[in-house]
Amino acid sequence: MPKMISNALKFIYLAACVVFVVWGLQEFLKSGSIYSLFGWCYLMLGTVSPAVVLLGNNRRRKEEKYLSPRSRLLVEGAVLIGIVLFIIGFSAPMGFIPQLIVSLLGFGMAVPSSFVYLYQSSPKPSPVDKEKS
């Protein structure tokens, strides 16, 4: 496929993902609560899908250039901080806007970072592979 068409398709795909994120935010604002199932579903479609597609076709993974131990530690920290912020946003007795901001910040840190960790970490041998060697 020509490079120009490939880049145009990536742009269209990412634009569609941004639309899902905007729909998720609109759903939260319309319902006035962060406990909107449709809002979280739209956000998942808008963030998980590009992470899987773009990281799954990553050149670094194909060239077997994985995360260094220091980078892995930083990504793990980002995932943990994101999870903590997400839980605080859901459970802390704050107003709607602070709850939404904190939970979205946590979601935005945890989800993409977890996919970076998943796709960029070196593969670990399975117990079956260990027994064969």
Image: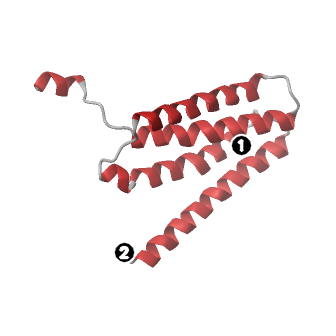
N-terminal label among 2 and 1 = 2
**Front-most of 76 and 131?**
76
Residue 24 rendering spot, x and y as whole percentages: 71, 48
Label 2: few (<14), some (14–19) or many (≥20) C-alpha neighbours in 10 Å: few
- Give how far across and how far down residue 34 sits, in percent: 77, 35
Kindly identify which residue carries mark 1.
39
Q: Which residue is mark 2?
A: 1
| Residue in the picture at 76% in, 22% down | 91
- Crowding around mark 1 (Cα neighbors within 10 Å: few <14, some 14 to 19, many 20+) is many
Foreground residue, 30 or 79?
79
Quarter of the figure with the C terminus: top left
| Helix, strand or loop at mark 2 | loop
Distance of mark 2 from mark 1, alpha carbons? 35 Å
Q: Residue at x 40, y 50 (%)?
A: 56
Q: Secondary structure at mark 1?
A: helix
In the depicted view, which residue is nearer to us: 70 or 12?
70
